[in-house]
Image (cartoon, rainbow, N blue to C red):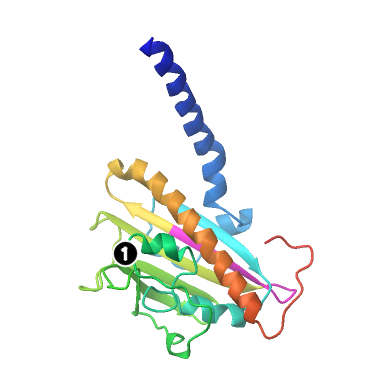
Amino acid sequence: MSRTVTLPRLALLAGAAAAYATVLRPRQLRWGATVDEDLEELPGDDLLPNARSQATRAITIEARPSDVWPWLVQIGADRGGFYTYDALENAFGLGIRSVERLVSGWQHLRPGDFVAADRRCRGGWFVERLEPERCLVLWTGDPRTGGRFDGRDTPAGYTWTYVLRERADGGTRLICRARFAYRSPLLLAPVEVIELVDWFMTQRMLRGIRDRAERCAPTPVSLEGTAA
């Protein structure tokens, strides 16, 4: 009896795993991004040349890069939040509150600054590269030592790149790339979970930035016929 029950379940699990690997995973790894955006080299790719996982997500925003950038540059648990699911993040004790306004004191981000992932600054990212209204590159590290996590001398490393591109119609393409490096093959299964969590939070973050930038943009632009 147990065998007749177990085999169908195993077959179902195997089928679900195959469907995710061949259909769902490729889609979430390039959510909203075009083929060209997914394949092109972006700033920060060189920081983790040994990356084993890469995701490129993007969104079209009905606002100019100058209207989008201020929302992006003030991200951080100790700053404007991440525009995602605050209740979910705070269930893990991160103490994050995503703001609905721009704060002048949070607009002066520079290379070397630390973007906290939680209110206690126990983890987060260093600003590695920054070109106003063009790109922001973040790299995980230890705020106590200033060391970066590269996945070679550390168990894992993670880079986060945001690129803003002005469209011919005045709108913005906001592209987000996440790259993940790790040493142990034992992390392979957890990486699949990390990718899903990363997609779940990133798509909400991109939508959150879009909604705020479009709502506050002084001069709305027309994006007729374009997909969000």
| Residue 177 image offset from top left, x and y in percent | 49, 61
Q: Is residue 172 magenta?
A: yes
Query: Quadrant of the image for the N terminus?
Result: top left
| Residue 126 image offset from top left, x and y in percent | 34, 73
Residue 142 relative to residue 112: left or right: left
Seen at 47% across and 79% down, the residue is 73
Seen in the picture, residue 19 relative to 100 is either above or below; the reply is: above
Q: Amino acid at mark 1?
A: Gly
Q: Can residue 89 be seen from the camera position used here?
A: yes
On the image, which quarter does residue 207 sit in? bottom right
On the image, which quarter does residue 137 sit in? bottom left
The foreground one among 79 and 178 is 79
Q: Is residue 75 magenta?
A: no
Q: How many numbered callouts?
A: 1
The foreground one among 37 and 75 is 75
| Residue 227 image offset from top left, x and y in percent | 71, 60
Query: Quadrant of the image for the C terminus?
Result: bottom right
On the image, which quarter does residue 31 sit in? bottom right
Q: Can residue 50 be seen from the camera position used here?
A: no
Residues shaded magenta: 167-178
Seen in the picture, residue 158 relative to 19 is either above or below; the reply is: below
> Which residue of the protein is positioned furthest toward the top in this rendering?
1
Residue 167 relative to residue 177: left or right: right
Seen at 34% across and 80% down, the residue is 113
Seen in the picture, residue 98 relative to 227 is either above or below; the reply is: below
Crowding around mark 1 (Cα neighbors within 10 Å: few <14, some 14 to 19, many 20+) is few
Q: Which residue is identified by label 1?
A: 93
Seen at 57% across and 47% down, the residue is 27
